[in-house]
């Protein structure tokens, strides 16, 4: 199979999309050739049967162009049509990662050329462009039933793609008088990080045996998100939590593993309603997790104690407090092993890519 992939970035240093490098490598193992069209091209080391074409966002970064949004978009669209046309004999099927606008732009041409179209989408938001894309594509891939909220017979729930060879336990038992809490993701209101900050205040006032440390790893991407970060920092200052809650900024995906391995607990307060990949990465590292995200209720099964049904800082703090005070190492290890098994069995990168390609082979193009 020869595959065309459209994605936002091919860059191993990208804190959000750096993981996609592993996806591309896995696709390359199973495909004769892979052509990738991305908005931004950064650093990467990929197999010889992968060709990467960029729409040129990195050119704008180098030239520090900031005031010509219209002309930049014209450039992107021109290159998009140029690439899908010049490469059309080099791919049989199309895989669009997250950004459905590529389906809207290229879908009719791909249909005319009899190229089967698949869209990967994991978010609760249902936009007009997504509704239009759903009509065009042949297949919609998503990580869980909650990760795609538009009713469609084209949906295939295939799990997430975590590389267990990279995201794995350190093999060293943590033993410290500091209980390390970590969360990772874009700094945005939908992540609901103020809940974690407020829980940290509650824990500090609980006179625990251990000191706590909270790291909120990630960076804002928009003006509104920058405002949200400043709001969080003000809450931390007002509550005198500067020695407890830290904002290290964005960290490349390839460097996240060591942070997950050294943490005692990963806390996810996201309100996206979709299966958060960062939680699964923590699980693969055998790091204990607690989440308020409804999407994980079904995923955890018998480990439902890891979810917080309410959305209050007190409930979250009580759940975290339980893990701080629980000294039953046997029970903790059992939970950690079960968390990793969930990822290995249902969200393994190798299985995901194989399944995606198998579905392409079995589905009928419209």
Image (cartoon, rainbow, N blue to C red):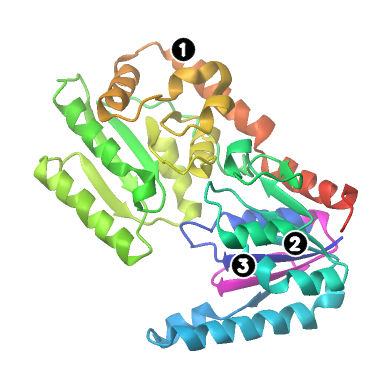
Q: CA distance from mark 2 to mark 1?
A: 49 Å
User: Which badge, 3 or 2, is on the more N-terminal residue?
Assistant: 3
Q: Secondary structure at mark 1?
A: helix
Q: CA distance from mark 3 to mark 1?
A: 47 Å
Q: Is residue 59 left or right of residue 213?
A: right
Answer with the quarter of the image where residue 249 lies: bottom left
Find the magenta span and give its range.
Answer: 29-51
Given residues 52 and 299, the one toward you in this image is 299
Instruction: Write down the residue under mark 1.
Output: 331
Q: Residue at x 52, y 30 (%)?
A: 296
Check disc 2: other Cα within 10 Å, few if <14, some if 14-19, many if 20+.
Answer: many
Question: In the rendering, at what x and y percent does residue 335 appear?
Answer: 50, 19
Given residues 130 and 19, the one toward you in this image is 130
**For residue 267, above or below residue 59:** above
Instruction: Write down the residue under mark 3.
Output: 101
**For residue 96, above or below residue 349:** below
Residue 97, can we see it?
no
Given residues 172 and 352, the one toward you in this image is 352
Q: Nearer the viewer, mark 2 or mark 1?
A: 2
Check disc 3: other Cα within 10 Å, few if <14, some if 14-19, many if 20+.
Answer: some
Instruction: Write down the residue under mark 2.
Output: 136
Question: In the rendering, at what x and y percent does residue 215 appear?
Answer: 30, 43
Q: Indicate whether residue 38 is drawn in magenta.
A: yes
Q: Is residue 233 left or right of residue 46?
A: left
Q: Quadrant of the C terminus?
A: bottom right
Q: Nearer the viewer, mark 3 or mark 2?
A: 2
Q: CA distance from mark 3 to mark 2?
A: 11 Å
Q: Nearer the viewer, mark 3 or mark 1?
A: 3
Question: In the rendering, at what x and y percent does residue 56 appear?
Answer: 56, 81
């Amino acid at each position: 199979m020869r595959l065309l992939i459209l994605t936002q970035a091919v860059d191993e240093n990208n804190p959000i999309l750096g993981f996609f490098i592993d996806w591309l490598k896995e696709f390359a193992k199973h495909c004769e050739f892979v052509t990738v069209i991305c908005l931004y091209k950064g650093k990467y080391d990929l197999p010889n049967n992968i060709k990467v074409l960029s729409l040129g966002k990195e050119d704008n970064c180098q030239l520090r162009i900031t005031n010509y949004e219209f002309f930049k978009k014209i450039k992107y669209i021109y290159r998009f049509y140029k690439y899908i046309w010049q490469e059309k004999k080099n791919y049989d099927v199309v895989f669009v990662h997250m950004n459905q606008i590529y389906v809207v732009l290229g879908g009719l041409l791909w249909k005319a050329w009899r190229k089967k179209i698949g869209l990967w989408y994991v978010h609760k938001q249902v936009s007009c462009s997504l509704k239009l894309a759903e009509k065009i594509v042949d297949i919609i891939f998503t990580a869980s039933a909650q990760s795609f909220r538009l009713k469609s017979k084209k949906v295939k729930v295939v799990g997430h793609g975590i590389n267990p060879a990279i995201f794995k336990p350190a093999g060293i038992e943590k033993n410290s008088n500091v209980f390390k809490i970590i969360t990772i993701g874009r700094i945005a209101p939908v992540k609901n990080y103020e809940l974690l900050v407020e829980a940290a205040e509650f824990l500090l006032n609980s006179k625990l045996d251990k000191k706590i440390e909270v790291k909120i790893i990630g960076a804002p991407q928009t003006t509104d998100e920058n405002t949200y970060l400043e709001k969080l920092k003000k809450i931390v200052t007002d509550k005198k939590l500067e020695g407890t809650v830290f904002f290290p900024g964005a960290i490349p995906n390839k460097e996240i593993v060591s942070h997950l391995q050294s943490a005692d607990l990963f806390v996810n307060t996201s309100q996206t309603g979709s299966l958060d990949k960062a939680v699964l990465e923590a699980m693969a590292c055998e790091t204990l997790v607690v989440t308020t995200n409804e999407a994980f209720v079904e995923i955890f099964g018998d480990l439902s104690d890891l979810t917080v049904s309410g959305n209050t800082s007190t409930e979250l703090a009580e759940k975290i407090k339980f893990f701080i005070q629980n000294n039953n190492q046997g029970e903790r290890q059992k939970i950690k092993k079960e968390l990793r098994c969930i990822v290995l069995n249902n969200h393994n990168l190798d299985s995901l890519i194989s399944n995606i390609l198998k579905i392409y082979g079995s589905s009928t193009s419209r």
